[in-house]
Image (tube, rainbow, N blue to C red):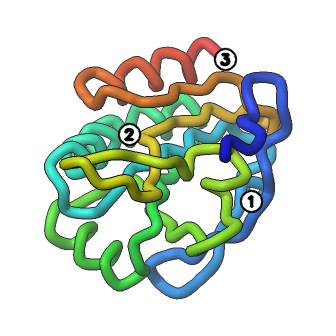
Amino acid sequence: MMANRPDAGDAMPDMAMETPDGGSVKASDFRGQKLVVFFYPKDNTPGCTTENKDFSALKGEFDAAGVALLGVSKDSARKHQNFIAKHDLKAPLATDAETDGLAEALGVWVEKKMYGKTYMGLERSTFLVDANGTIAQVWRKVKVKGHAEEVLAAAKAL
């Protein structure tokens, strides 16, 4: 089931995703600046809320370092709007396609198990992309605590 799993040195796939305002965003929109794309499973769940709040809290530092942020899940644009409003999130969010989207292209749409059930879901993963659109660093199966700070340090060092 594992398709390709792009890694550091590979080009960031350029696939359009929906923004909460009904627009569209893709990695090439950020050419010329560094980009952090963080995938998280679901809006308004504890770990995902913490992760989004952590990135939001550091958004000023990412901005100062010339690094764009983009949080991605399969939640609808409407769910994203509610999530942003409820938690005053600063990091922009996007909705990945239900099938054959960026998550599949990056190998982060994976088989998961919970309570004995097997299902498809997003693996919490983060991609640091350089100004030329090349993946510089990948974090897979992310643990939320301290992650945003670690990504910021790596982005500043890039």
Residue under the image location 38 percent in, 39 percent down: 60
Q: Amino acid at mark 2?
A: Gly
Residue 158, which numbered label? Answer: 3
Tell me the residue that label 1 is attached to. Answer: 29
Give the secondary structure at mark 1: helix
Q: What percent of the width, then of the height, locates residue 154? A: 54, 17
The foreground one among 147 and 7 is: 7
Residue 93 picture quarter: bottom left
Alpha carbon of mark 1 to alpha carbon of mark 3: how far? 19 Å
Residue under the image location 27 percent in, 67 percent down: 84
Residue 85, which numbered label? Answer: none
Disc with the residue nearer the chain's start (2 vs 3): 2
In the picture, measured across the screen, residue 95 lies left or right of residue 17, that is left
Q: What percent of the width, then of the height, locates residue 24? A: 64, 77
Tell me the residue that label 2 is attached to. Answer: 60
Alpha carbon of mark 2 to alpha carbon of mark 3: how far? 17 Å
Q: Nearer the viewer, mark 1 or mark 2?
A: 1
Residue under the image location 34 percent in, 73 percent down: 80
Q: Amino acid at mark 3?
A: Leu
The foreground one among 141 and 33 is: 141
Packing grade of label 3 (10 A; few <14, some 14-19, many >=20) is some
Task: Give the answer, above or below, for where 99 lies relative to 133.
Answer: below
Task: Give the answer, above or below, for where 152 lies relative to 85.
Answer: above
Residue under the image location 71 percent in, 24 percent down: 136
Task: Give the answer, above or below, for where 114 lies relative to 155.
Answer: below
Give the secondary structure at mark 2: helix
